Image (cartoon, rainbow, N blue to C red):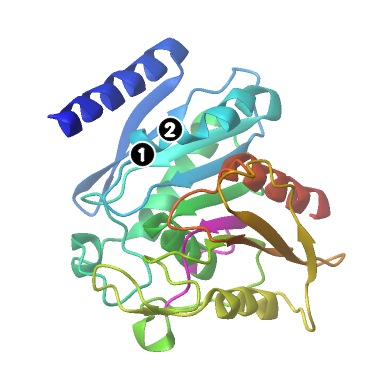
């Protein structure tokens, strides 16, 4: 009964948020016989050449539920010239790079690249977004999908943030990598049982993943970095939660930035010390400036 009541409250809250803002548009595209849906904030009529940010939900989720967690970034969307798009995975999952994933999207080999390419074309045609400012933030299964887009569509995707996700090991890799340099930020917790920080079996029989350090090193090497990253500690804005964040960064003029936010004692969720979407936007803006 309590769970039903909580679900009811969540739905009411989301509907209130959507109706009160009166800015969320729902649409879909026909991809290989499947209507793929997505949701987005309606930009200002003067908001041309905006940045496009895809926000990708985790396995079992959907785009509408992702809206609530981005309220702070949505509040800045018009002034910062951002179009936020919340796609829905196929049957609540993505066809990402983990070969062992049992989800229908993977089993049926759903063409995610076609979906994202057509969403990009839709946003360029209808809202005049800047094709040089297209970014992705993904959480859990959405983080794996962000990795896929960075590996397979780097000519269109200009930077990603992957949250609580590690790259699959070679034997579990189901993507053809273009291996083009791209800005990447990773946000992972050291106590995550679903996406093990030190690598191993990812939850729900989705196969082996690399460690966070190996994943971080993959992108740093791809972007031409050697040696050790710089390290800083972020302000502990919530000292009661027992978590702190260490920031490791590879950054050099003329190269894409690669950053790891290591959440000490963090689990399979967003850390409270930062807003991951505002942090991602700050990261993406730094990439816009160097390009």
The picture places residue 217, in percent across and down from the top left corner, at 64, 79
The picture places residue 105, in percent across and down from the top left corner, at 24, 61
Classify mark 2: helix, strand or loop.
Answer: helix
Instruction: State whether residue 209 is above or below residue 232.
Output: below
Instruction: State whether residue 80 is above or below residue 113.
Output: above
Residue shown at 48% from the left, 70% from the top: 166
Is residue 158 visible in this depiction of the protein? no
Classify mark 1: helix, strand or loop.
Answer: helix
Q: In the figure, is residue 275 to the left or right of 25?
A: right
CA neighbours of label 2 inside 10 A, class few (<14), some (14 to 19), many (20+): many
Mark 1 — residue?
A: 63
Q: Quadrant of residue 102?
A: bottom left
Does the segment drawn in magenta span residue 165?
yes
Q: Find the distance from the CA under tag 1 to the CA under tag 2.
A: 7 Å
Mark 2 — residue?
A: 67
Q: Residue placed farthest to the right in the image? A: 253
- Magenta segment range? 152-168
Instruction: State whether residue 106 is above or below residue 123.
Output: below
Q: Residue placed farthest to the bottom in the image? A: 171
Q: In the figure, is residue 211 to the left or right of 12?
A: right
Does the segment drawn in magenta span residue 252?
no
Q: Quadrant of the N terminus?
A: top left
Q: Quadrant of the C terminus?
A: bottom right
Residue shown at 55% from the left, 23% from the top: 43
The picture places residue 110, in percent across and down from the top left corner, at 26, 61
Q: In the figure, is residue 139 to the left or right of 1?
A: right
Residue shown at 61% from the left, 27% from the top: 77
CA neighbours of label 1 inside 10 A, class few (<14), some (14 to 19), many (20+): many
Q: Tell whether label 2 touches label 1 (CB within 8 Å).
A: yes
């Amino acid at each position: 009964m309590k769970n039903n009541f909580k679900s009811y409250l969540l739905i009411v809250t989301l509907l209130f948020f959507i109706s009160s803002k009166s800015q969320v548009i729902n649409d879909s595209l026909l991809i290989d016989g499947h209507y793929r849906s997505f949701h987005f904030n309606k930009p200002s009529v003067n908001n041309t050449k905006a940045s496009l940010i895809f926000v990708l939900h985790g396995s079992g989720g959907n785009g509408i539920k992702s809206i609530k967690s981005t309220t702070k970034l949505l509040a800045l969307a018009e002034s910062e010239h951002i179009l936020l798009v919340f796609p829905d995975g196929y049957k609540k999952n993505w066809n990402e790079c983990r070969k062992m994933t049992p989800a229908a999207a993977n089993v049926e080999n759903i063409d995610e690249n076609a979906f994202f390419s057509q969403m990009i074309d839709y946003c360029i045609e209808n809202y005049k977004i800047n094709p040089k400012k297209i970014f992705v933030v993904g959480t859990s299964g959405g983080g794996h999908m962000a990795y896929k887009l960075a590996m397979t569509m780097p000519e269109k995707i200009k930077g990603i943030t992957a949250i609580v996700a590690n790259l699959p090991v070679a034997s579990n890799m189901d993507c053809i990598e273009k291996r083009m340099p791209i800005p990447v930020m990773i946000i992972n917790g050291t106590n995550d049982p679903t996406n093990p920080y030190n690598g191993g079996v990812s939850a729900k029989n989705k196969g082996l993943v690399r460690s966070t350090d190996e994943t971080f090193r993959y992108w740093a090497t791809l972007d031409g970095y050697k040696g050790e990253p710089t390290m800083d500690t972020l302000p502990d804005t919530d000292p009661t939660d027992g978590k702190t964040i260490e920031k490791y960064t590879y950054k050099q003029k003329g190269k894409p930035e690669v950053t790891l936010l290591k959440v000490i004692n963090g689990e399979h969720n967003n850390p409270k010390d930062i807003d991951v979407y505002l942090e991602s936007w700050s990261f993406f803006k730094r990439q816009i400036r160097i390009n």
